[in-house]
Amino acid sequence: MLVLAACFIGYLVISGSMELQAIFGLAIALGNAYGLLFVILLMGNGLIRVPRWLWASSFPDRELDILFFRATEVLDVAYQYLLIAFM
């Protein structure tokens, strides 16, 4: 995608339809648009998930209990696959 954009900008400069100063303005505008789009897409998820993750990770005993619970689920699934494999 970046190569395609560079080729397009190169074509605009070589063909003479855009001056170099206009290319710089276009690059700045596209960079700002990309940054705003990126922030908008990630903001909804990050504003909720990051504080929740920080809060949950501040209790190591609870986190250890959750990991133990997940480990038993994984072990149960592994035993089921082993039973199916050897039947």
Image (spheres, rainbow, N blue to C red):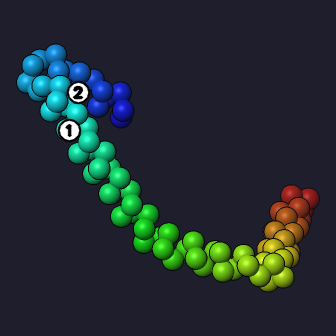
Image quarter (top left, top right, bottom left or bottom right) of the N terminus: top left
Residue that appears at 36% across and 64% down: 40
Residue that appears at 26% across and 38% down: 27
Compared with 10, 42 (above or below) is: below
Could you tell me residue 62's position as x and y percent? 79, 83
Instruction: Please report whichever mark, 1 or 2, sits nearer to the chain's N-terminal start.
Output: 2
Q: Amino acid at mark 1?
A: Leu
Residue that appears at 81% across and 78% down: 60
Residue found at the very far front of the displayed protein: 21
Decide which of 46, 28 is in the foreground and name it: 28
Could you tell me residue 11's position as x and y percent? 19, 21
Residue underneath mark 1: 26
Q: What numbered label is drawn on residue 9?
A: 2
Task: Specify whether residue 49 is in view.
Answer: yes
Compared with 22, 56 (above or below) is: below
Task: Report the side of 63 relative to 17 (left or right).
Answer: right
Q: Based on the displayed image, in which of its 4 quarters is residue 18 positioned?
A: top left
Q: Based on the displayed image, in which of its 4 quarters is residue 64 positioned?
A: bottom right
Q: Amino acid at mark 2?
A: Ile
- How many marks on residues? 2
Compared with 62, 32 (above or below) is: above
Task: Specify whether residue 66 is in view.
Answer: no
Callout 2: SS: helix
Residue found at the very far left of the displayed protein: 17
